Image: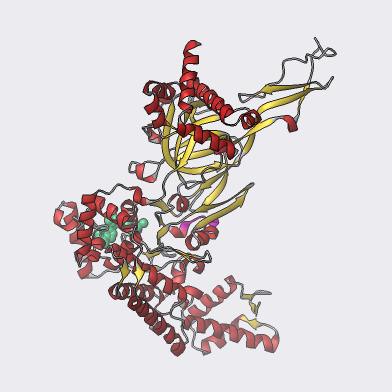
Amino acid sequence: MSVEKDVEGRFMLFFKQEKYRALIARAAAQGHGSVMVDHSDLIAFDEELSHRIVEEPLKYLPILDRAAYRQLQVEDPEYAEKIGEFKARIYNLPEKLLIRDVRSIHLRKLIAIDGIMVRASAIKPILRVGVFRCRSCGAEYRVEQDSQRIKLPERCNSPTCRGRKSRFDLVEEKSEYYDYQLVGVQEKPEDLPPGQLPRVIDVGLRGDIVDKARPGDRVIVTGVLYAIQERGGETPLKTSRMYLDALSIETASKEPESLQITPEEERLFQEMARDPDIHEKLAQSIAPSIYGLDHIKKAIMLLLFGGRTKTFPDGVKVRGDIHILLVGDPGVGKSQLLRYAAAIAPRGLYTSGRGSTAAGLTAAVVRDKGGGMMLEAGALVLADMGVCCIDEIDKMRPEDRVAIHEAMAQQTVSIAKGGIVATLNARTSVLAAANPVLGRYDDYQPFTDNVNLPITILSRFDLIFVLKDRPEPEQDRLVASHILGLQSKSPTSISPPIKPEILRKYIAYAKRINPELTPRAAKLIEDFYLKMRGMYQQTSTITITARQLESLIRLAEARARAALREYVTEEDVLDVIELMKKSLAEVGVDIETGKPDIDVILTGKPKSMRDKFSIVIKTIKEFQEQKGFAEDEELKEALKEQGLSEDEISKLLNRLLNEGKVFTPKPGVYRLT
Ligand code: ADP
Ligand code: MG
């Protein structure tokens, strides 16, 4: 006991330091129930004691709390009386454990972990002090609670009840509660060894630290590790689950800049940026094992740097993040490019369209083990402030199909389900790949028929590229020799101009720069935009929209960033215009007219296709006006006379039926809806 008294005395001295007196007084003034205690201050104050807290927190933390409360009684006796207890929340332990390194030797010790919060339950009240009323005489008793089961008074002591067995009711309004929230903290993607599934640890937050962080936030949690008995279990042994009872939770910096960059590295980067071929070299350093695809690598390079996010005075935000979609035949290197980009990006995440968790790409409300509801963050939220590489995006869950628009445009994910309402941040660049609907890209179908994604999602991509696997002797020979050279480890063919470790840091460093458009660069973008819009006048084909205008700005800014420039040059603009034209041509060239046609993306049909649809609709309408409906054979005959092939006609009709523009009141008969 005397040791304990000594310790309490030491702790009271600790809280008498100027810094902590001020912090405790402030906590009282702001109505907080705790004070944050920097562990490094404890080390400085009494190294021996600081170790003992870490080794035996169950013994020392209550003493620390009591000492803090004593100081609160000095600073603000009235407030101390009112709240009855006060907590010291330790943070900043000297070492942080990786979640995958947490072991049973850490049980009942104070540890700190860092990771991403992936899920959070609703906040639930937990009984701290129960007030119970005797059913027979009405006498009331206060009982302090501590464990999972509710503790009742042992007996009623009133004269009328004495000796008899009494029953008690909980008096809800006089009882005291604290808040509780269960969250899951997962390893950061960058801490994950290759090929491993991320591990998650359950963390309990009690009192004023609930809701301190949201799913998707990077956090450092300091707390005491417990083992919780598992019900059932797959092994004959009784196993337990790790559970961290949190003392404090800090949200860590979101900036990839937290990568350490030394002055020497800074000098190196500046020198690299002066190289006139810097853009080429950067692009060639992306997935050097993949031959060719230079324009795609260049686009991915721009995506990694990103444009500037702009916030206007009225609060409207324009994203700086660049989204790119690769559509193409199997085996052309899409997955490889995505994996590489995820590894290079300072905060990269590779996932498949199905997502690797229940939360998929966006977020979900899932039932936890205890039957409560948990909000779980999906890939786009976990990659906040980074790059999310989504392979086979065409296979995403229907829920994600609905929610991904918001993530790509507003950069948030909202969810309201099972009593949980939340908006999570998803300030993420999307690099996605999709396979063609029919397995192979069909040149004779419009782009939108080749990919199983709604136009609303397609139009969110700044650049779309189509990769086709067509036998071309010369190209094939080059790819083959590249791959063969690779596998016989000839280093010249694969070594990238810039090593991955350096590239990664270079990107993180470049992201600090916010390049401005020079007036001449802005003029060039405007000219291009107006010229493309002008073509709309001549050909009645919308070629470009304001969306592409914003895309061009983003891309040009990214190109300036890549050279560590504070301003966007004309060269930047001309280069990204080329890239944009190439992308437009790949998705939009109407094979029959040869005109770039952004309508393909916006409406899903190339112009001449649209003409054909209008012919079908017009013809049905004519029949309908004559006799109330169009009969199958008559209609097909009439359409053939207008130059449509049998094949085309059935495709067009099917499509109109699917889209609900036409219906069949009875078999063999069509009507417009
Ligand atoms: P996809 O995802 O497009 O189906 P993958 O990325 O899985 O294709 O590529 C299949 C394999 O072919 C990979 O091992 C990849 O390295 C190789 N490959 C495909 N295209 C190229 C290329 N242009 N140069 C070198 N290797 C390639
Ligand atoms: Mg693939």
Q: Position of residue 92 (x, y in %)?
A: 41, 35
Q: Position of residue 608 (x, y in %)?
A: 47, 83
- Going 79% across and 20% down the picture, which residue do you hit? 167
Identify whether 117 is placed above or below 131.
Answer: below
* Residue 280 left/right relative to 101: left
**Residue 511 appears in the picture as rendered:** yes
* Residue 523 left/right relative to 627: left
Picture colour scheme: secondary structure
Residue 566, located in which quarter of the rendered image?
Answer: bottom left
Please state the extent of the stretch shown in magenta in the rendering. Answer: 395-400
Which of these two is toward me, 452 or 54?
54
Identify whether 669 is placed above or below 275.
Answer: below
Which of these two is toward me, 13 or 601?
13
- Going 76% across and 29% down the picture, which residue do you hit? 171
- Going 62% across and 84% down the picture, which residue do you hit? 620
Tell me which secondary structure the magenta stretch mostly adopts: helix
Residue 353, located in which quarter of the rendered image?
Answer: bottom left
Quarter containing the C terminus: bottom right
Residue 71, located in which quarter of the rendered image?
Answer: top right
Which of these two is toward me, 167 or 88?
88
- Quarter of the rendered structure image containing ligand 1: bottom left
Furthest toward the top, the residue is 163
* Residue 165 left/right relative to 77: right
Q: Is residue 533 magenta?
A: no
Q: Position of residue 84 (x, y in %)?
A: 63, 27
Identify whether 353 is placed above or below 180.
Answer: below
**Residue 246 appears in the picture as rendered:** no
Which of these two is toward me, 443 or 56?
56
Identify whether 408 is placed above or below 208.
Answer: below
